[in-house]
């Protein structure tokens, strides 16, 4: 039996392999867009499509969905699938943030090294 982490990893791999949403693509998304989409799927994951709370879900969706994304990308399914998508999007956002932090550390290290060399001349 696959665990939740296994299912999320499998979905993330599908997103990269079939949709082309690789790290370079993800790095183009700023301002928490991936996390916002993940939040929408996570909220949708706790309700069935016929649940009376769908009105609340729709209000949350309108407030959270990344403003630069069209609604054609909103493709909810059953609660389990929605939670899997949410997890994969969170993983993508975390990876993006980690890459961003690594680039910033490298930039600061390069600046520090350049300043060190400048002080020797």
Image (cartoon, rainbow, N blue to C red):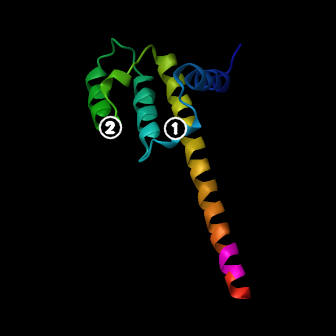
Residue 19 x, y percent position in the rendering:
52, 22
* SS class, disc 1: helix
Residue 38 x, y percent position in the rendering:
46, 33
Q: Is residue 17 above or below residue 104?
A: above
Q: What residue does disc 1 label?
A: 26
Seen in the image, is 58 located left or right of residue 101?
left
Dividing the picture into quarters, in which one does residue 48 lie?
Answer: top left
Q: Where the C terminus falls, by quadrant?
A: bottom right
Q: Residue at x 60, y 22 (%)?
A: 17
Q: Where the N terminus falls, by quadrant?
A: top right
Most foreground residue, 70 or 75: 70
Q: Residue at x 64, y 26 (%)?
A: 9
Seen in the image, is 80 located left or right of residue 119?
left
Most foreground residue, 47 or 34: 34
Most foreground residue, 117 or 68: 117
Residue 82 x, y percent position in the rendering:
47, 21
Q: Assess disc 1: are there few (<14), some (14-19) or many (≥20) residues with their C-alpha within 10 Å of its C-alpha.
A: some
Separation (CA) of disc 1 from disc 2: 14 Å
Q: What residue does disc 2 label?
A: 68
Dividing the picture into quarters, in which one does residue 8 lie?
Answer: top right
Residue 58 x, y percent position in the rendering:
28, 26
Q: Is residue 51 above or below residue 98?
A: above
- Label 2 near label 1: C-beta < 8 Å? no
Q: Which contiguous range is marked in magenta?
A: 113-117
Please tell me whether residue 115 belongs to the stretch shown in magenta.
yes
Seen in the image, is 50 located left or right of residue 79?
left
Please tell me whether residue 6 belongs to the stretch shown in magenta.
no
Q: Residue at x 51, y 38 (%)?
A: 26
Q: Earlier in the sequence, mark 1 or mark 2?
A: 1
Work out which residue is located at the far right of the displayed protein and give it.
120
Q: Main secondary structure of the magenta part?
A: helix
């Amino acid at each position: 039996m696959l665990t939740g982490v296994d299912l999320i990893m499998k979905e993330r791999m599908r997103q990269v392999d079939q949709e082309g949403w690789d790290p370079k693509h993800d790095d183009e998304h700023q301002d928490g867009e991936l996390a916002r989409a993940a939040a929408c799927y996570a909220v949708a994951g706790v309700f069935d499509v016929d649940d009376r709370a769908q009105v609340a879900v729709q209000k949350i969706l309108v407030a959270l969905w990344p403003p630069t994304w069209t609604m054609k990308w909103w493709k909810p399914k059953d609660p389990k699938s929605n939670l899997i998508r949410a997890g994969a999007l969170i993983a993508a956002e975390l990876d993006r943030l980690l890459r961003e932090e690594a680039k910033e550390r490298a930039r600061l290290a390069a600046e520090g090294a350049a300043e060190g060399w400048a002080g020797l001349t």
